[in-house]
């Protein structure tokens, strides 16, 4: 069981880390661009270095290299890893080129994750290649017309039957309800945007109960 934050914007990550015991951070080019558009003028490598400083050890940082081709994708993945081999994990898109990159990493005994895993067969191949994590996109599956609960449950069943140590990290989680559904379906871990993580902490029923306690406390003699 682990909670990761899905963001590249350093102020948000720092604020949430004070509230939630984060196991690490997941990033991708879209999140890096979003952070840049919010005024965070840092190159990707600089973001990685800041994250390593900002997040207490042994927090993990997942970085996604480009996969235009096998050679450049592998080189960038290794460059990320070499920044801190114990804490940086390449997050590889589940494509043919991504699979080639992952096999190079596996041959060198490097950890890696497959992201954008949408089918049970992809999950099976990812585990066979030696991925430490597979990352299905919960809300994106739902928007494509697939029941994400059923799909994650099927992935979990296959991994369990194969006695695989590969972990399912649910991403594209847009609400506390989706987070709960992903966990019930069999996800081991979650990576969640900052605001959704904040929303998961509170609930109107809880707030109402606390207000009643405070009202009654003031009446005590």
Image (cartoon, rainbow, N blue to C red):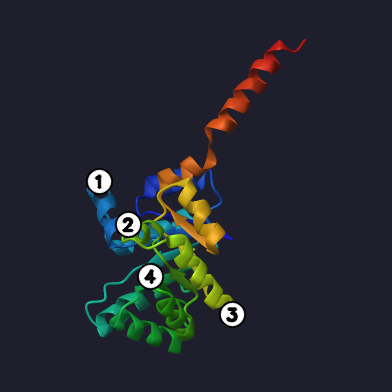
| Closer to viewer: mark 1 or mark 2 | 2
Number of marks in the rendered image: 4
- Residue at image mark 2: 143
How far apart marks 2 and 3 lie (CA) works out to: 29 Å
Q: Residues within 10 Å of mark 1 (few under 14, many from 20)?
A: few
Q: Earlier in the sequence, mark 1 or mark 3?
A: 1
Q: Earlier in the sequence, mark 2 or mark 4?
A: 4
In the rendered image, residue 22, in percent from the top left (x then y), is placed at 52, 54
Q: Which mark is residue 39?
A: 1
How far apart marks 4 and 1 lie (CA) works out to: 33 Å
Q: Earlier in the sequence, mark 4 or mark 3?
A: 4
Q: Which mark is residue 161?
A: 3
Q: Earlier in the sequence, mark 4 or mark 1?
A: 1
Secondary structure found at label 2: helix
Question: Does residue 107 lie above or below 143 as drawn?
Answer: below
Q: Nearer the viewer, residue 131 or 125?
A: 125
| Closer to viewer: mark 2 or mark 4 | 2
In the rendered image, residue 32, in percent from the top left (x then y), is placed at 29, 57
Left or right of 18, for residue 114: left
Residue 201, can we see it?
A: yes
Q: Quadrant of the C terminus?
A: top right
Q: Earlier in the sequence, mark 1 or mark 2?
A: 1
Secondary structure found at label 4: loop
Residue at point 60% right, 22% down?
211
Residue at point 42% right, 47% down?
194
């Amino acid at each position: 069981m682990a909670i990761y934050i899905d963001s590249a914007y350093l102020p948000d990550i720092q604020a949430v880390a004070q509230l939630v015991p984060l196991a690490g951070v997941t990033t991708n080019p879209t999140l890096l661009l979003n952070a840049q558009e919010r005024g965070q003028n840092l190159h990707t490598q600089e973001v990685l270095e800041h994250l390593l400083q900002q997040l207490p050890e042994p927090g993990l940082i997942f970085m996604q290299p480009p996969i235009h081709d096998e050679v450049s994708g592998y080189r960038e993945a290794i460059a990320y890893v070499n920044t801190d081999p114990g804490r940086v994990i390449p997050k590889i898109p589940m494509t043919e080129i991504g699979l080639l990159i992952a096999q190079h990493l596996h041959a060198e005994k490097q950890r890696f994750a497959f992201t954008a895993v949408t089918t049970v067969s992809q999950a099976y191949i990812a585990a066979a290649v030696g991925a430490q994590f597979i990352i299905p996109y919960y809300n994106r599956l739902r928007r494509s017309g697939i029941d994400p609960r059923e799909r994650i449950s099927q992935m979990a069943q296959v991994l369990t039957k194969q006695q695989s140590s590969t972990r399912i990290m649910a991403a594209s989680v847009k609400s506390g309800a989706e987070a709960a559904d992903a966990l019930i379906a069999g996800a081991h871990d979650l990576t969640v945007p900052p605001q959704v993580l904040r929303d998961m902490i509170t609930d109107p029923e809880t707030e109402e109960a606390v207000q009643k306690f405070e009202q009654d406390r003031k009446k005590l003699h």
